[in-house]
Image: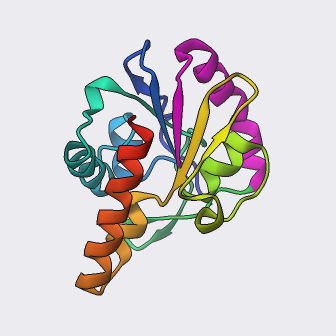
Amino acid sequence: AHCASQTVFGEGSETSKWMIVGEQPGDQEDIQGRPFVGPAGKLLDQCLEHAGLSRQQLYITNAVKHFRFEPRGKRRLHKTPSVGHIDACRWWLVQERKFVKPKNILAMGATAARSILGHQVSVNDARGRSHLQPDGSRVFVTVHPSYLLRLTDPDTRRSETDRFIEDLKCFGE
């Protein structure tokens, strides 16, 4: 993996009762220095709107604060963060949680779920229910919007996007 150009910290309402945690910044996030500004972020914004939420109400961040990638020609392709990267960045996420004190936390993807829950989880097994944390917050686990973007069958993409919107609604209650 090559080095990211910058650290991408969380942003949003510092008094929000909702925190969304993604896996790691992507190419556009690394370039702009802001979380969820690329294709997955645009899809997330659309789905949030369908769920009755807006980015302005949320604090949004990532479990890993830097873009891990492999160069392919002129493109930089996402590379899954290692457990070492997750563990090294967990301190930041813990501090963000202490500062914001969210009531509900949405972990999008296995990396985010592992970082928040402290152990490896299957997104499908953990999805659909809340996980009460020692600080009283509730963690919800769902897919990452980039998963939805990779689905090639239109019917599957539509049904999975609808399911993701339902996850956002549960998280937003």
Identify which residue is drawn at 55% across, 57% down. 109
Residue 119 sits above or below residue 58 on the image:
below
Locate the N terminus and report the quarter of the image it occupies.
bottom right
Q: Farthest residue in the bottom direction?
A: 153
| Left or right position of 56 against 110 | left
Magenta-colored stretch includes residue 116? no
Residue 87, percent from left and from top: 77, 42
Q: Quadrant of residue 59?
A: top left
Q: Quadrant of residue 32?
A: top left
| Left or right position of 126 against 169 | right
Dominant SS of magenta comes to: helix
Identify which residue is drawn at 26% across, 45% down. 51
Q: Magenta part of the protein: which range?
A: 83-108
Residue 71, percent from left and from top: 48, 67
Residue 157, percent from left and from top: 30, 76
Q: Quadrant of residue 14?
A: top left
Locate the C terminus and report the quarter of the image it occupies.
top left
Identify which residue is drawn at 76% across, 53% down. 83
